[in-house]
Structures are given as structure tokens and as C-alpha cells.
Amino acid sequence: MKHYKTSETVDAVVIGTGAGGAPLLARLAAAGLKVVALEAGKHWNPATDFATDEKSQEKLFWNDERLSAGNDPIPFGSNNSGTGVGGSTLHYTAYTPRAQPDDFQLRTDFGVGEDWPLGFDQIEPYYDEVEQFLGISGPSPYPWGPARKRAYALGPLPINGAGQLMERGCKELGIKTSPAANAALSAGYYQEGVGYRPACANRGFCQAGCNIGAKASMDVTYIPLAVHHGAEIRPESFVTQLIKDAAGRISEVIYIRNGQEERQRCRYVFLCAGTIETARLLLLNNLANSSGQVGRNVMAHTGLQIWGEFEEDIRPYKGIPGALISEDTHRPEKADFAGGYLLQSIGVMPVTYISQMARARGLWGQDLKQAALAYNHVAGINILGDCLPHAHNYLELSDEKDIRGLPKPRIYFSNGENEKRMTAHADKIMRDIWSAASARNIWAFPRNAHVIGTCRMGTDPATSVVSPDGQSFDTPNLFISDNSTFPSALSVNPALTIMALALRTADRFLEKHK
Amino acid sequence: MLMHDQYPDGTVRALLATDQVTEATRLALTERLTISPQPPQFFTASEFSLLQAICDRLIPQDERTERIDIAGRIDERLILNKSDGWRYDVMPADGDAYKLGLAGVDEAARLLFLQTFQQLSDELKDEVLKAIQHQEAPGETWQKLPANRFFEELLTEVANTYYCHPLAQEEIGYVGMADVPTWQRIGLNQLEDREPKSTERGAGGMV
């Protein structure tokens, strides 16, 4: 790997190596730019560092404490940000549905929420590119959304017990299902600049780290590609300051490595630290916020889970967790809410399942032990639905300091009427599906997943933080590429769209600034 | 209602001795299996024994000869100042919440039953814990500390700590750590040879 001197002025510093940073880093490096990626976490070696043990794998989560406020406080840690080269893709479920064209124009269609300043047609070529590069496994044709130009790179992964049960229940109710698109390989896959990755072992451990490279986390896909093209990855480098020169451009990035402060000189900065840390860093540095919008419009997908116990042996630790999908609820008929959601079957690891059961059902004593004994017979369905931006949902810096002496972020989140109605709609459908599939002891785990927003993109500098190209209106050599810029939450898991948008941001930058 | 499953003892421990688990997995689980109880560092001795008494009610281990040390792991986390990445804004820092909450458990026990928590029968201990869980416990503590959130956080950590232990995983028939051979039989009612069968459910099924 190439190493740049901190005294050298590199073309770009990329802060964060997850879904927003890694694809962009690879693109800039391939164009011949001198690029350095600063990553707060370690550069793991999955084969030797990743145990098949949920407790040890907590090291992949962003474990710096965040304060969760509002009526529906968001749990962080295991959900949302990650720590390590690859960011949250180290522990994402690898679910990679595309957003549909109408997801980008919620306001036009429903009069609420926001339209994106760019449409599906501008994202679509990048969806296609990312899907082929990562080796997405999925059905072709895919039953929902516009016809794709190319089939998925690989056929779908095998369906596990939870998927079979959801298929059974949905069939009874006339709901169409399909094997889902997942960023885990159904067969061995080779990419120039990356090398060979083996097929998925059906290990069901995506959310705690893949140890063979079958799951397309960034550390085994775009990061090796970036390094192949001459990028430097600098792990365990926690960025604290962005220093402006007299002309108002960022000239240096300050970060802590091995307990020491280091500075990297640069021409451009790409902030790709995710919804929370990107906004936190801007607020800490009083940057890019003439609109007052940094930290506003926090969104989190509706993510209700419905669990049930079945007579059948399921062993929910086997197979890709999100094996089956339905998008029949993308725009449900006679709905009393804007937007919609998708349905997916879910397998689950034991500690995750039992901990959230204890939390949500409040079971303890013999009741908890008996419910835990049913683990091998449980299966879940969950939704992933749109969330409107509300003024009451935002991020601020608190007075409480973290171990580095920096203010901890406080995030306010309360579901609005639209999210509550969508969740009630989904609660009924999922209970019906599970009843039709002969589930017993059905219970609901209320949740919101995937925090989004805080640095909205738009065309008006008065109401948005960055342009549709991800460029700060206030600080022209600062760009943002991550889920913080999403103007609306979309009704699908965000990772694929973050990656696609990252490539578009890189291409737009190269067209204008190279 | 479904019959309760029962799985054989020793499954995970036997698998750890094979090449069906990776070295990283073997190291992590063996360490957890063999770690010996230490005196508390974060809690005082009396706080620690109270926490142990509470853990015994949240997850009874009466049938076990080898007990899983839950309180010790919580003490270890707090002395290392480790976080799970978030906390309810209405709650104080984790360590303070534990100390306050433990005092509140004894306070509630005294106000309800005129004895410390540990002096109570199992039934009365459970009454105290239920009162806290449902925000009905008396005491000054609960004016400062939201009782339901304290209970929720405590219970979640206790459940998490217990079920990440290999012995608890044997109890529920989990062998997902034995992943080296890959899983090929993943559909309904499809088991690999290394997956233990429940001795209770089997032929009987529903009752």
C-alpha cells in the first residue's frame, strides 16, 4: 500500500471507509488522485480476528456513547455506525434492494416529506455498477420496480426456514414474494483489483461480521480496489478538526492516532462518517452550517419486527438472514399514510434475539428461560419503511464529554403520525402472515433502524447543507458522501443507495475539479 | 402451548475440541468458559452481592452445577468503562445508574417488606422486582431514576451476558459457532449431524 507524508498536500482526504467513503475513494484513486482515507477503527483481518461469537464481535460497532432522546429513542451501537475499515458494512445484513423511482419524489406524490434533487434515472446506472462489482445475488427478473438492464451478478442465495415460512404465509394471503437481493455471494466471484471471494457459507452471521469475505463489506471490495489504484488507508485515525485557511477552504485535517495528534494537508475533504459523526464533526468545527440545517431532519426507517414460534425446526442461525422479500406493500392500496415499506423474512443470532426479547417483552425468570428455549423454533418478519423528516427529530451536541473530551451527540427521535400509521398497517399484515403460517406466541419488537439525514442535500443553500453533487454550499472544497445527505429516507435499506450515490458524487467531482 | 425443548449437555464444549470451529471462535468461547470469578472492582462487596441476588431472580440457575457469572461480567464492563454505543438520555451514566438502582432495590424492599432484598423469600424478591419493572416501586431513588428504564437496561444486559455463555448456548441447543464445514441443510426441519436434537419436542410435538 502507498503511504503519503502528512506534510505532503494530497488531493483528497476521505473521512470514513464505509458505504459512503469506500466506493468514492476507489473512484478517486482510479482517476489518479492522491487520496488518503482516515478511519477511526482498526483494519481487521476477518479470517483471524472475527469469531463466530456475538459478544466478541461487538468490537465492530460504533461504541462511543450517544444519548438517545425523544419518545422513541434510537438504539445505536449494533445498529447503524460501525468501527473499522469498512464501517457499518462490516455488520450490515447485506440487504441490497434498489429504491424505486417514486421513492425519490415523496412530496410530489403525497404532498409531505421531500423530493430528492435528483431522480432514479441518475442513480440507476450506479445501482447497476455496484450490483455487478459487489456480486449481488438476486432473482432475475426481480418482480418489483423498473426492469433492470442487466440480471443480478449471481442467482439468489438459498432460502432458509424463516424464508420458507414467510413464503407459506404470504401465499395463503395472496402476497407475492421473491428471493431477496443480498450482497453475499451465491457462488465464487472474481473482480479485477479485488481478487477471488468464496461463496456464502450460510453462516447467518452477517450482522456480526463475515469471516470469509463472501459478504460484500467494503473492506473486501471497494477498499482493496482503492488500494490497488494507489489509495492509502490510515486506520485508527480519529478525526477531530478540519482547519480552514484564510480563503475559507479546508487545508488540513487533524486526527488522533496512537494518542498523538497528526495533521494531513489536502486540497479536498470528503466527509463520509455517517449521519451521526458527519454532523457531529461539522457542528464541533462550526462548519458548513450557514443554513442551520446541520443536525436537522434525523430520520430512521420504520422497522417493526414480528416474531413467532413454529412447530418446525428452524435453527434461525442458518442461511442469509434476509432471504425472502415482498415489495407488495411499497404503495399499499387504501393506505392512510404516505409512502410505503417492504417486508422481509429474518433469521437471527441467539444473543440478539433473546436480548431484544427481554427488552421488549420484559420477560424474566422462568418465563425468559422458557421463551429462550424456543430459539431453534423462531422466525421473524420485519418491515423497512419510509420515515418523514420532522422538525422534532434532530441531533445536537450535549454538554457531556466523551473520553476524548469531545461533546457526546444527543439524538432526538419520535415517530410521527405517518410512521405510526405505517407501523400499525404493517403490524396487522405481518401478524396475519405469521398466523397463516401457523405461528404460536407471536410478539412484536418495535424499532426504528438506519439513522438517516442531518446534512440534507438540495438545490437551495438556505434549506440544505450540500448540493445534489454533495458539495458544501459554504465550504467549496468540502463534500459529503453518506446517508446524512438523504433528503428522504426511502423505503428500502440504505447501503446500496449510499454506495451508488458515492460513485455519482465522485464522478461529478472528477468532471468539475480534476 | 408448545412443549419445552430440552437439549443434551456438552454439545458446544465437544464442538470446541474439533476443527469445526475456527481458532478465533475457539479462543473467545474457551476464555468465557474458563474464566474464574474475581472479586468486584467497580461495585462494593455489598452492592455486588445484591446484584448477584437480583441476577439469580432474573435468570435462575438453580439447576446448574457450574454457574454462569453474570454480575462479574457487568462489574468488568463498568470498571473498563465500556459502552454499547448509546444510552437513554433520561438515564445517568451506566455506572451511576447501576449504583443508584441497586440502592433503590434495597430501598424498595425495605419500604415494601421491612427487610433488605437479600433477606426476602424468592416470592417477595420477585414482588420487588415486578414493582420496579412496572414503575410502582416506592422510594426516593425512583424520583431520580426512571425505574422502568433501569429495569429494562439491567434485564437486557443480564440476558445478553447469560446467553453469550457457551453453557447457556448448550441449554438452548445453539451450535452456530461450528461453522467451518458451512451449513448446507438450512431449510425447515433440515439438520446437520452436528446440530443437537431436542429430547422433549420430537415425537410429541404439540400438547
Image: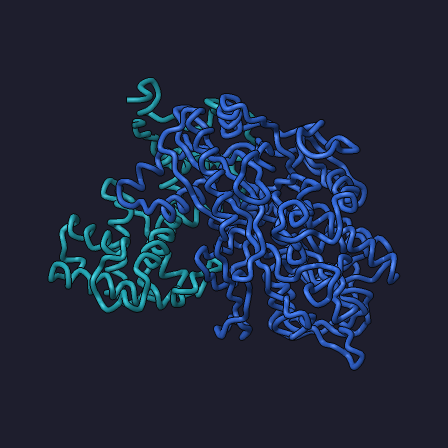
Query: Could you say which is closer to the camera, residue B97 or residue A315?
Result: B97
Query: Could you say which is closer to the camera, residue A309 or residue B41?
Result: A309
Q: Quadrant of residue A259?
A: bottom right
Residue A234 against residue A169 in the figure, above or below: below
* Quadrant in the picture for the N terminus of chain A: bottom right
Image colour for chain B is cyan
Image colour for chain A is blue
Residue A322 against residue B150 in the figure, above or below: above
Number of labels in the image equals 0
Residue B108 at least partly seen: yes
Q: Quadrant of residue B183?
A: top right
Residue A235 at least partly seen: no
Left or right of residue A484, residue A305 in this image = left
Residue drawn 51% across and 56% down? Answer: A76
Q: Quadrant of residue A99?
A: top right
Q: Position of residue A281 (x, y in %)?
A: 63, 68
Q: What's the image's color scheme?
A: by chain
* Quadrant in the picture for the C terminus of chain A: bottom right
Left or right of residue A426, residue A90 in this image = right
Left or right of residue A84, residue A127 in this image = right
Q: Position of residue A325 (x, y in %)?
A: 58, 32
Q: Position of residue B47 (x, y in %)?
A: 26, 64
Residue drawn 37% across and 66% down? Answer: B95
Residue drawn 28% across and 54% down? Answer: B133
Q: Position of residue A291 (x, y in %)?
A: 67, 69
Give the residue furthest to the top: B203
Residue A424 against residue A270 in the figure, above or below: above
